[in-house]
């Protein structure tokens, strides 16, 4: 059983569309990180959210941490082919022993 | 990019043979980690190190051992490889252990156990 459930597992959209990826848990996390991974490479950190209700923006990407610090979302506005990749959420409960979700594979078609 | 080198990048081995994967960093970070990535499971922590000769188990440590004799090198050993250990293995590093610390990942080792 995955401690962090990500949805959807796969997403294939056209360039210019908006999308949201969800990361849910029944556990409380002290922080939540989002990573992006390209084929053949390791994950790269996009953002860390720490405070319940916190919203962070990174260009066209908006990240939100749930008020109870059990869930998070990633919203991409006007997706571009360069956004294609595997998106992973990871929750920290103690130090850096992160718990990762299974990931969302995003494909943006031009 | 963080200076992390994993070797080998690809490995095919037979069941029952020992395998050692190497992670080398040039960042002088104190903390080093070994993860495995499998479809449907995301990344799972195998072992981590908080200093030279200081290591601890992660959530999927059975069948794996690690060693860290120098700050820059963290070795992962499969004493007797099994088919269930076929996976992509990632090394990661971080300067500290706080919940806000950023992990830097290597490019991974694809291991196939036949």
Image: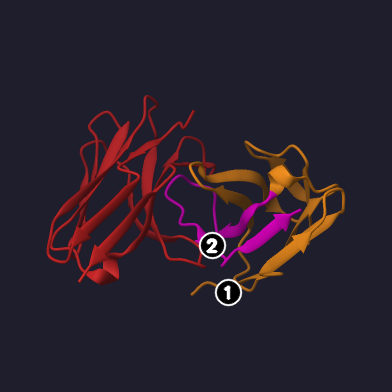
Query: Foreground residue, A95 or A109?
Result: A109
Q: Residue at point 20% right, 68% down? A: A80
Helix, strand or loop at mark 2: strand
The image shows residue B55 at horizontal and vertical percentages of 73, 46
The answer to whether residue B71 shows anywhere in this view is no
- Establish if A8 lies above or below A77: above
In the foreground, A9 or B101:
A9
| Quadrant of the image occupied by residue B8 | bottom right
Q: Is residue B87 magenta?
A: yes
Q: Chain of mark 2?
A: B
* Colouring used for the render: by chain
Is residue B94 in view from this perspective? yes
Residue B26, percent from left and from top: 63, 74
Q: Which mark is residue B105?
A: 2
Q: Earlier in the sequence, mark 2 or mark 1?
A: 1
- Look at discs 2 and 1 and give the one toward the viewer: 2
Chain that the image shows in orange: B
Tell me, yes or no, whether the two marked residues, 2 and 1, touch with CB atoms within 8 Å.
Answer: no
Classify mark 1: helix, strand or loop.
loop
Question: Is residue B106 rendered magenta in the image?
Answer: yes
Q: Residues within 10 Å of mark 2 (few under 14, many from 20)?
A: many
Q: Few, some or many C-alpha atoms within 10 Å of disc 1 (few <14, some 14-19, many ≥20)?
A: few
Q: Which residues are magenta?
A: B86-114
Chain that appears red: A
Of the numbered discs in the image, which one, if any, rests on residue B3? Answer: 1
Q: Residue at x 46, y 53 (%)?
A: B101
Is A90 left or right of B86, judged from the image as shown?
left
Which residue lies most toward the top here?
A26
Q: How many marks?
A: 2
């Amino acid at each position: 059983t995955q401690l962090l459930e990500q949805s959807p597992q796969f997403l294939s959209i056209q360039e210019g569309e908006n999308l949201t990826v969800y990361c849910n848990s029944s556990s409380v996390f002290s922080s939540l990180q989002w990573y992006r991974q390209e084929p053949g490479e390791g994950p790269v950190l996009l953002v860390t959210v720490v405070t319940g209700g916190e919203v962070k923006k990174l260009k066209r990407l908006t990240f939100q941490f749930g008020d109870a610090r059990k869930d998070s979302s990633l919203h991409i506005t006007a997706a571009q082919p360069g956004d294609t990749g595997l998106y992973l959420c990871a929750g920290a409960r103690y130090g850096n022993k992160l718990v990762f979700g299974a990931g969302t594979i995003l494909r943006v078609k031009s | 990019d963080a200076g992390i080198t994993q070797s080998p990048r690809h490995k095919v081995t037979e069941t029952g043979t020992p395998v050692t994967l190497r992670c080398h960093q040039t960042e002088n970070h104190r903390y080093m980690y070994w993860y495995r990535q499998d479809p449907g499971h995301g990344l799972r922590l195998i072992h981590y190190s908080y200093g030279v000769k200081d290591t601890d188990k992660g959530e999927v440590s059975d069948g794996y051992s690690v060693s860290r004799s120098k700050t820059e090198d963290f070795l992962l050993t499969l004493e007797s490889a099994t088919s269930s250990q076929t996976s992509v293995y990632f090394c990661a590093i971080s300067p500290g252990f706080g919940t806000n610390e950023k992990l830097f990942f290597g490019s991974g080792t694809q291991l196939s156990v036949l």
